[in-house]
Image: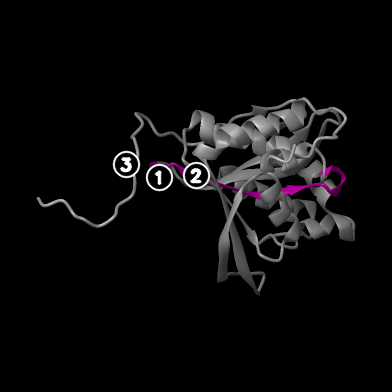
Amino acid sequence: MTQSSLPVGNIVEPITHVDLPHRTDYAGKFITLSPVDPQVDVTELYECSHGSQTQEQIWTYMSYGPFDSKRSMQTWLEEGAESADPLFFTVHHLESKQRIGMVSFLNIVSDMRRLELGHIWYSPDFQRSNVNTEAMYLMLCEAFDRLKYRRVEWKCDSLNERSRAAALRLSFKFEGIFRQHIIVKGRNRDTAWYSMLDSEWTAIKKNMEMWLYQNSDRKLSLTALNTGKI
C-alpha cells in the first residue's frame, strides 16, 4: 500500500489496560468524595442547597433543581446512585463533618481515554474555599495518574462566569463556545468548552499540591502559580 503524503496525527502509544473511574471513596486532607448514598445523604444535601435565594442559585445553570421537597431530591439521588455515567459522588467536609455538595465523572469514553468533570455544586458556605480545588485534584489524580487518560474536559453554560473562572484557575484551557448547544429548562445554552491534557498534568498537579498543602496562610494564588507569575 502506498503511504499517504497527507499530514496525520502523532502515534498514540497503547496501554495494556484501560479502566473506568472507581466507585469508591477518594480521601483528601479537607474532604472525602464518596459514592452517593441517597437515604443517608439527602437531608444534609437538601438543607445546604435549599431554603434561601443564595442557596437555590446553585441550581441556576443545572438541568435539574431546585427540588420542591426533600423527597423529590431523594428520588433524583436514587436515580443518580444507579448511574455509571455520570458517576456521582457526595462531598464530605472533614472538619465540619457535613455533606456539602456533589461532583461527578461523566461522558466517560474509556477507549479514547477521555472523560469530563461535571455536575459540580457546593453549599454557598464552602464556595471560594479549598473544597473545589481538592475535589478536582482528587478526580484529576484518578483520571491521569491511575487511569492514564489523555484528556479531561470541563463544560459549562457560557453565561456561568463562576464556573468559567474556576476552570481557568485550575488551568483548564479554553477551547471555544458551542453555540446553541443544548436547551436547559426551556432556555438556550451556549456551552463553553475547556480541557486539560496528560502532558500538562505534572506541572498543574505540583501547583495544586503546593496551593492545597503548603499554603496554610493562603497567600499563594493558584492562578499565579499556574501562569508562572510567582
User: In screen coordinates, is 215 left or right of 148?
Assistant: right
**Mark 3 vs mark 1: in front:** 3
Q: Which color scheme is applied?
A: one colour
**Coordinates of residue 180 in the picture (x, y in percent):** 57, 73
The residue carrying pointer 3 sits among few (fewer than 14), some (14 to 19) or many (20 or more) residues within 10 Å by Cα, namely: few
Residue 36 visible somewhere in the drawing: no
Given contact means CB atoms under 8 Å apart, are the residues at marks 2 and 3 in contact? Answer: no
User: In screen coordinates, is 21 left or right of 124?
Assistant: left
| Residue tagged 2 | 151
Q: Amino acid at mark 3?
A: Ile
The residue carrying pointer 1 sits among few (fewer than 14), some (14 to 19) or many (20 or more) residues within 10 Å by Cα, namely: few
User: Which residue lies most toward the right here?
Assistant: 52
Q: Nearer the viewer, residue 215 or 230?
A: 230
**Coordinates of residue 164 in the picture (x, y in percent):** 69, 56
Q: CA distance from mark 2 to mark 3?
A: 16 Å
Considering the numbered disc 1 on the image, is that residue within a helix, a strand or a loop?
A: helix
**Coordinates of residue 106 in the picture (x, y in percent):** 55, 48
Task: Please say whether residue 64 is one of the residues in the magenta stretch.
Answer: no
| Residue tagged 3 | 11
Seen in the picture, residue 185 relative to 147 is either above or below; the reply is below
Q: At 75% from the left edge and 32% from the top edge, which residue is drawn?
A: 211
Considering the numbered disc 3 on the image, is that residue within a helix, a strand or a loop?
A: loop
Q: Amino acid at mark 1?
A: Met
Q: Nearer the viewer, residue 70 or 34?
A: 34
Q: CA distance from mark 2 to mark 1?
A: 9 Å
Q: CA distance from mark 3 to mark 1?
A: 13 Å
Q: At 71% from the left edge and 38% from the top edge, which residue is drawn?
A: 225
| Residue tagged 1 | 112
Q: Amino acid at mark 2?
A: Arg
Considering the numbered disc 2 on the image, is that residue within a helix, a strand or a loop?
A: strand
Given contact means CB atoms under 8 Å apart, are the residues at marks 2 and 1 in contact? Answer: yes
Which stretch did the figure color magenta? 111-126
